[in-house]
Amino acid sequence: MSNIRFAGAQLPASDNLDKNVQDIKDAITWAHQNNVDYLLTPEGSLSGYFPGFDTYNGRSVEDLYAAEKQVVEFATKNSVGLCLGTMWCEDDSRFTEGYRKENQIRFYSNIGKFLGSTNKTYVIPEYDQTVISEELNIIDMDYDTQGFYAAGLICNDFWGGPLSSKKSLPVYVTEERNAQVIFHATNGFKGELPNYDKITDAWHEGNLRMMSFVTSVPIITVDSCYKMNGKEYDGKTSSQSGILSNGIWKVKAPRHGIQYFYYDFDINQIINFGFEEHPDQTILDSNPLIKGSIA
């Protein structure tokens, strides 16, 4: 059996670019120490996730590019594959700034090869701004001599479909686009409206488990532990961070602060869709593979 280790880092997607770089580097160091193959970070974890991320507090697009280079080079040095949640700027002369703003997961192999990116499809206009929703990319992931296909879904891409009469993207990417793993980076509203938090918390939990059950592929999901506007927050995250398969939580991270977690899968089962389809077990509340770290 050849195992592959997927991990997530529940991080602050703050409004401070330097802090975000350091937090991601710290997560990469942990990933290296724990022999992680691919590490997922939250939505906007590098850039922050708020309107004006590209010019906030005097920063420039070049600053964002330099920050991305730092974390990718650090991940490469530590032989960690990186699935990086960040806002991004792509050259585009149709826009006044000369670029369009996109909300992405950017994928890199453990030798620093850029494997591709996926854009958020079900966007929040105020936050995601000039994002142009295009056909979802499916990423051909490098792993030793065996590759597998991954989908990157961002926040509402996972739970937005049924609420807006649009297609369910988790089902679409697995059944129609043949994704074998789903990486889900999110950064939800939290702490402003307690009743809203309770309702969405139940929705997120049920949707994650149901989509895991329906698609029968591993799902790695991670939320930010800061507010969406990049400000400090010491409460409960908007969504559970962890790893699921067939409707079962294989690992669940604590719902506050910086947390790291991982889980091993048999790469041959991923490639051949060899998971048990409908196990009797209904839920796993905790797992010794949780690795937590408080900033």
Image: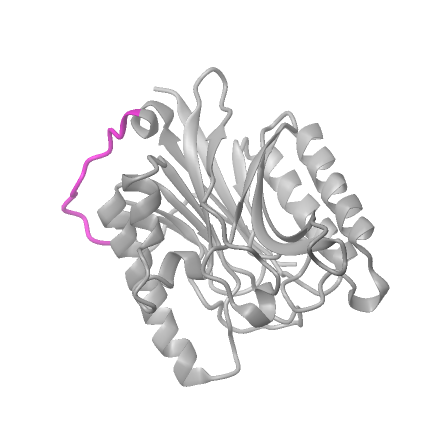
Q: Is residue 246 visible?
A: no
Instruction: Name the quadrant of the C terminus.
Output: bottom right
Q: Is residue 120 visible?
A: yes
- In screen coordinates, is 273 left or right of 8? left
Give the percent coordinates (x, y) of residue 176. 30, 40
Give the residue at x 81% y 51%: 63
Give the residue at x 43% y 41%: 151
Give the residue at x 36% y 64%: 204
**Which residue is at the front of the view, 159 or 217?**
159
Above or below for 254 versus 25: below
- Give the residue furthest to the front: 94
- Give the residue furthest to the right: 58
- In screen coordinates, is 272 left or right of 15? left
The verdict on residue 79 being magenta is no
Q: Quadrant of residue 95?
A: bottom right
| Magenta region | 272-283
Give the percent coordinates (x, y) of residue 79. 63, 28
Instruction: Name the quadrant of the N terminus.
Output: top left
**Which residue is at the front of the view, 214 or 267?**
214
Above or below for 65 versus 138: below
Above or below for 236 versus 284: below
Q: Quadrant of residue 109?
A: top right
Q: Quadrant of residue 239?
A: bottom left
Give the residue at x 41% y 80%: 196
The secondary structure that most of the magenta stretch takes on is loop
Give the percent coordinates (x, y) of residue 171. 29, 48
Looking at the picture, the colour scheme in use is one colour
